[in-house]
Image (tube, rainbow, N blue to C red):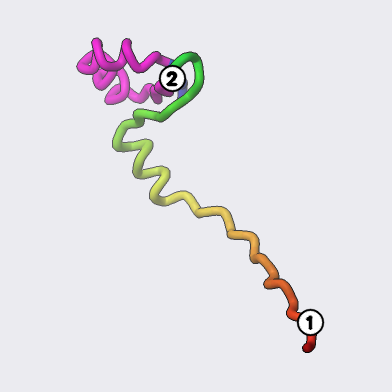
Amino acid sequence: MKSLPLPVAHVRNNLSDVLKDVREGTRVRVTRHGKPVGWIIGPSEREKLAVAPKPAKKSRSRRQRRPA
């Protein structure tokens, strides 16, 4: 799956074309000043995310209290 970086201004000015590309399977990485600020993905990609296993959380050990 290809990913396409696009500035926010381009996405705003060409939203219908961007959504057409997304519908056809392109992932869009939205950038502001060259830094990623979000993604636009199609429904099929969203379904893949919903089914994908989530990474296990690291358990934090609680700090042991010293006896008084």
- Between residue 64 and residue 50, name the one nearer to us: 64
Give the CA separation, mark 1 to mark 2.
49 Å
The residue under label 2 is which amino acid type? Thr
In the rendered image of this protein, does residue 58 appear above or below residue 6? below
Tally of numbered discs: 2
Q: Residue furthest left?
A: 16
Rendered location of residue 1, percent (x, y) = 46, 25
Residue holding disc 1: 66
> Observer-nearest residue: 43 or 62?
62
Which residue shows up at 41% across the image and 51% down it?
Answer: 51
Name the residue at 24% across, 11% down. Answer: 13
Front residue (pair 37, 50): 37
Residue 25 point in image, percent of width and height: 35, 25
> What is the secondary structure assignment of the residue under circle 2?
strand
Residue at image point 64% right, 65% down: 59
Q: SS for tag 1?
A: loop
Q: What stretch of residues is rendered in magenta?
A: 6-30
What's the residue at 25%, 21% (across, down)? 19
Task: In the rendered view, tell whether residue 19 sits above or below residue 47.
Answer: above
Residue 28 occupies quadrant: top left
- Depicted 67 relative to depicted 7: above or below: below
Would residue 56 be found to the left or right of residue 16 on screen?
right
Q: Residues within 10 Å of mark 1 (few under 14, many from 20)?
A: few
- Res. 31 mark: 2
Residue at the bottom extreme, as displayed: 68
Magenta-colored stretch includes residue 52? no
